[in-house]
Image (spheres, rainbow, N blue to C red):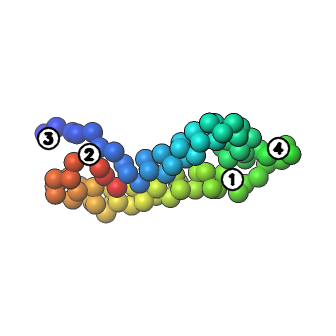
Amino acid sequence: MAKRKMTIPFAIVAPVAVLAVAVARDMINGNYQSIQTGLTGLGSDGKFHIEPIIQSYGPIAVGAVVHYAAKELGVNQELGRAGVPIVRV
């Protein structure tokens, strides 16, 4: 049995990294209301808004679907056979 190597699912990690950078930028600028609205959907008016949730988590959900599709189609196995280190779709 072949030794399993750690791989990074790029389709999921990239959108999470973009969200983390946006949150860090808002924290540095002191824009905590924007963080709350973007991550929870609760606006300063106390009401729930779906648009920030879609903007924050939509790319992560799309990345998860792309990752699953790539796994099912065998793209990640082919990347491994081609010798591409660490990164997978």
Amino acid type at circle 4 is: Ser
Front-lying residue, 47 or 21: 21
Disc 4: which residue: 44
* Mark 1 and mark 3: Cα distance apart in space: 44 Å
Image location (x, y in percent) of residue 33:
74, 41
Name the image quarter holding residue 28.
top right
Disc 2: which residue: 86
> Residue 2 got which mark?
3
The number of callouts visible is 4
Q: Nearer the viewer, mark 4 or mark 2?
A: 4
* Mark 4 and mark 2: Cα distance apart in space: 42 Å
Residue pictured at 77% horizontal, 44% vertical: 42
What is the crowding at mark 4: few (fewer than 14 residues within 10 Å), some, or many (at least 20)? few
Front-lying residue, 74 or 40: 40
Amino acid type at circle 3 is: Ala
* Mark 1 and mark 4: Cα distance apart in space: 13 Å
Q: Nearer the viewer, mark 1 or mark 3?
A: 1
Q: Earlier in the sequence, mark 1 or mark 4?
A: 4
